[in-house]
Amino acid sequence: MKIQFLGTAGGRFGVSRQERASGGIYIETCGKKLYLDPGPGALVHARRNNIPLEELDAILLSHVHQDHTNDANVLIDILTKGGWEKKGILIGSRTALEGHENIEKAILDYYLNFMEKIVVMEPGDTFDLDSLKITATPTKHGDPKGIGFVLKGEKTLSYVSDSYYFKGLEEHHKNSDILILNHIFPREESTAEKKNKDHTDTYSAEKLIERTDPKLVITQHFGLTMMKVGPENEARWLEEQTGMKVVAAKDFQVFEF
Ligand SMILES: [Zn+2]
């Protein structure tokens, strides 16, 4: 399994500055090439890192927000040669692919028609991409239909996506080989003191890590204050508290297992 971070910025302010990139995550597993949450800059950074965009098997969208979907339309255009070849599977939350209540979908109908298959997932749904089992997990976030993913293949990868911690979240991400956390807020920006309880802060990351017992935690999707504080410092604190291996991803970093 290979995971490459095409950016580690998250949230509207973290992304707007582009001090870190925000192009999402490229994954190779079970012979499949997946692009997860292609935020702004995915195209540029994928090209600079030689990601085979014409060969993607699936694009996965956890929720509708721009920092997770912005470049998805252009990735579809590239994958399908502007619609000449109907191919690839688009997997995503209902809001991202269909819209929900007053939130418009992120993918234009024009590009949806280029895909070979579209899979709308709700928490608990599963989809088998040959030997890779994809399960949608629940989130609590600005997008009411947002999901995370568990990819079970040669390794088990848990991607919580954007969510604040809620009781029971850990049940969906237990005992993974790799747990990816969108770690927007450091301790000094604890969401417990914030009105906007939309994201994972260091304290909720601690809870989640302790209760899910993964082999490795990778943090990413850092907000602006987190970047100033230093994601590595928060990761080190999490390691000390939990006794587990926690790595703060760097832009374009590759992990191979
Ligand atoms: Zn979001």
Image (cartoon, rainbow, N blue to C red):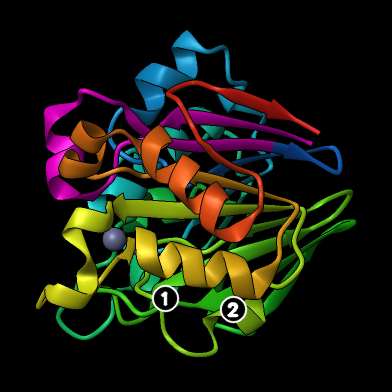
Report, in whole angstroms, how far the alpha carbon at label 1 lies from the one at label 2: 22 Å
Amino acid at the residue labelled 1: Arg
Q: Given the image, on which type of amino acid does mark 2 rest?
A: Glu
User: Contact, CB < 8 Å: mark 1 with mark 2?
Assistant: no
- In which quadrant is the N terminus drawn? top right
The residue identified by callout 2 is: 170
Residue shown at the point (20%, 38%) measured from the top left? 15
Q: Is residue 150 found inside the magenta-colored segment of the image?
A: no
Q: Can residue 82 be seen in this view?
A: no
Tell me the residue at 77%/53% (across/down): 177
Quadrant into which the C terminus falls: top right
Question: Does 23 appear in magenta?
Answer: yes
State left or right for residue 231 relative to residue 229. Answer: right
Q: Quadrant of residue 10?
A: top left
**Which quadrant of the frame does ligand 1 lie within?**
bottom left
Residue at image location 28% in from the left, 26% down from the top: 20
Q: In this view, does 184 lie above or below 85?
A: below
**Disc sitting over residue 94 in the figure:** 1
Magenta span of residues: 1-27
Which of these two is toward me, 177 or 205? 205
Question: Residue 119: x percent and y percent?
Answer: 58, 68
Ligand 1 has an atom within 8 Å of the beta carbon of the residue at disc 1: no
Secondary-structure class at tag 1: helix
Lower position in the chain sequence, tag 1 or tag 2: 1
